[in-house]
């Protein structure tokens, strides 16, 4: 898979821009604050449906304008995929001219890996950073995983609402188990997906790391979870 071109309209500091990419390696260089990361951000949005820099999506629209558009064309297995993104009041996606019902519909169309200097936080910071990284990677490969994550978060939310109802409305505490059971069920599935992904990564990195360290170091990633079977 490779990205052919990207068209930007009123996106960040770009009013109108068309960029064509080479099939192989592309190097984007320039002075500070010229818009290099903005280009990466536009690719990320067309692949994962959201920015890696902001949750406030209005920020993506050029300060002087009312709306922003991105069009990205990529080729996968000899077929072109066109993703259109538009943001005005709300954001909208089109996949090959057909409106996407949900943002998650665009996942898996383009496989991307973003690596920035901040990614060192995956190793250094708290586990939630590592989970986020895993979520981004697995979501692209397994649409079902996105569905599970949404379900998991919704169930936690409902459980929290019920906890308040126990406290303030004297609802029976026994009913809490309804949510607990669901959380366990969904959590188990999420765990399996993550475990599988890490096993696959391990197969790949072992060789790469042996080569780069001239057979001196064996690398292995361990998934430590508090799930007990
Ligand atoms: N909504 C917006 N409207 C107009 N300009 C914007 C908007 N959001 C960001 N910018 C501009 O985009 C520029 C930053 O772009 P970007 O972060 O891509 O730069 P960069 O080339 O990656 O720089 P560096 O080399 O420092 O990483 C800044 O000039 C900033 O003012
Ligand atoms: Mg930058």
Image: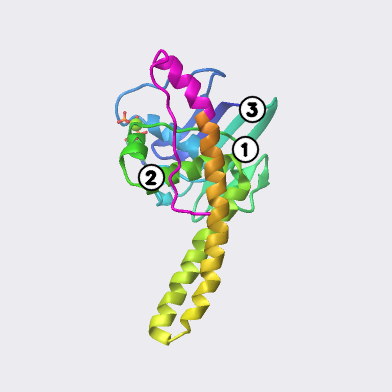
Q: Is residue 35 left or right of residue 196?
A: left
- The answer to whether residue 103 of the structure is visible from this angle is no
Q: CB of mark 2 within 8 Å of CB of mark 1?
A: no
Image mark for residue 129: 2
Disc 1 target residue: 109
- Foreground label between 2 and 1: 2
Helix, strand or loop status at disc 2: helix
Q: Nearer the viewer, residue 63 or 218?
A: 218
Image mark for residue 75: 3
Q: CB of mark 2 within 8 Å of CB of mark 3?
A: no
Q: Is residue 142 left or right of residue 50?
A: right
Does the beta carbon at disc 3 come under 8 Å from ligand 1? no
Q: Nearer the viewer, residue 123 or 118?
A: 123
Q: Position of residue 46 (x, y in %)?
A: 54, 39
Mark sitting earlier along the chain (2/3): 3
Q: Position of residue 24 (x, y in %)?
A: 54, 17
- Foreground label between 2 and 3: 2
Q: Position of residue 200 (x, y in %)?
A: 55, 33
Q: CA distance from mark 2 to mark 3?
A: 31 Å
Name the residue rendered at 40%, 52% in the picture. 56
Mark sitting earlier along the chain (3/1): 3
Q: Residues within 10 Å of mark 1 (few under 14, many from 20)?
A: many
């Amino acid at each position: 898979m490779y990205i052919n071109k990207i068209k930007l309209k009123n996106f960040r500091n770009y009013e109108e821009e068309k960029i064509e990419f080479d099939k192989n390696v592309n190097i984007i260089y320039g002075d500070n604050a010229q818009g290099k990361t903005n280009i990466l951000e536009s690719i990320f949005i067309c692949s994962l449906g959201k920015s890696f820099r902001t949750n406030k999506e209005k920020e993506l629209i050029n300060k002087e304008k009312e709306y922003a558009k991105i069009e990205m064309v990529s080729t996968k297995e000899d077929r072109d995929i066109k993703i259109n993104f538009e943001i005005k009041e709300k954001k909208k996606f089109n996949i090959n001219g057909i409106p996407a019902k949900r943002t998650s519909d665009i996942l898996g169309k383009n496989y991307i890996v973003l690596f920035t200097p901040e990614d060192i936080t995956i190793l250094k910071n708290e586990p939630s950073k590592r989970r986020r990284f895993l979520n981004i990677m697995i979501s692209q490969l397994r649409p079902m995983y996105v569905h599970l994550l949404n379900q998991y978060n919704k169930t936690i939310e409902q459980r929290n609402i019920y906890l308040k109802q126990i406290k303030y409305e004297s609802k029976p505490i026994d009913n809490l188990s309804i949510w607990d059971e669901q959380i366990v069920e969904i959590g188990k599935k999420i765990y399996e997906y993550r475990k599988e992904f890490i096993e696959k990564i391990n197969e790949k990195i072992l060789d790469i790391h042996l080569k780069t360290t001239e057979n001196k170091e064996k690398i292995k990633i361990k998934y430590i979870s508090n799930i007990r079977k």
